Amino acid sequence: MSLLLLVVSALHILILILLFVATLDKSWWTLPGKESLNLWYDCTWNNETKTWACSNVSENGWLKAVQVLMVLSLILCCLSFILFMFQLYTMRRGGLFYATGLCQLCTSVAVFTGALIYAIHVEEILAKHPRGGSFGYCFALAWVAFPLALVSGIVYIHLRKRE
């Protein structure tokens, strides 16, 4: 049982790390010149002045929705980990981790929705940037975090506390 708890906790911490990097790092979209854009700032290299030019992201409603959903997924994932630890030490023997599992399932839905919105509306979100480019590693990390959070939520729902 202790090995299972260790694996579940390690999976949860891995999901938290993936979500933090996906939300806060700078590579949701990679431009052709190896420059990358994130959810919060647009920083591009200016060859004439040899400096980075940073500005706030566009006021696109779809991008704001992605930002909100990614932050929500982080909050829900942190909350579910805290809830898991609380339930682990206070719940009676034989209890199920329904609340933790539900929080983690909501995390997976938030990540899925945010990444899907970004994928579908990327042309609208990046309208002021040159055409071309590809999805960056933060976008891929968000998609990796989705099934892991989904599996984690299902495991929590079926996990029963034993002595």
Image: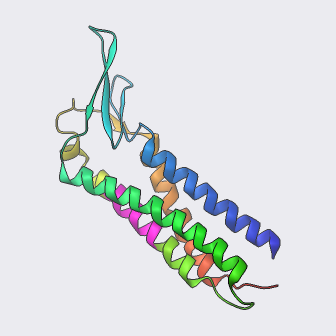
Q: In this view, does 96 lie above or below 45?
A: below
Q: Does the magenta stretch include residue 109?
A: yes
Q: Nearer the viewer, residue 118 or 57?
A: 57
52 relative to 106 in the view: left or right: left
Query: Which quadrant would the N terminus be assigned to in this image?
Result: bottom right
On the rendered structure, is 32 left or right of 73? left
Left or right, 162 with reference to 10: right
Left or right placement of residue 132 versus residue 99 in this view: left
Residue span colored magenta = 106-116
Residue at image location 70% in from the left, 77% down from the top: 88
Residue 125 x/y as whole percent: 22, 45
Q: Is 139 in front, or is 133?
A: 139
Up/down of 131 relative to 160, above or below? above
Q: Residue at image x 43%, y 48%?
A: 23
Q: Please name the residue shown 19% across and 53% down the image.
A: 61
Residue 6, position as x, y percentages in the image: 75, 65
Q: In this view, does 113 lie above or below 106?
A: above
At a point 62% along the width and 82% down the height, the residue shown is 97
- Residue 8 screen position, x and y as percent: 68, 68
Image-quadrant location for residue 100: bottom right
Residue 151 appears in view: no
Secondary structure character of the magenta stretch overall? helix
Residue 136 visible within the image:
yes
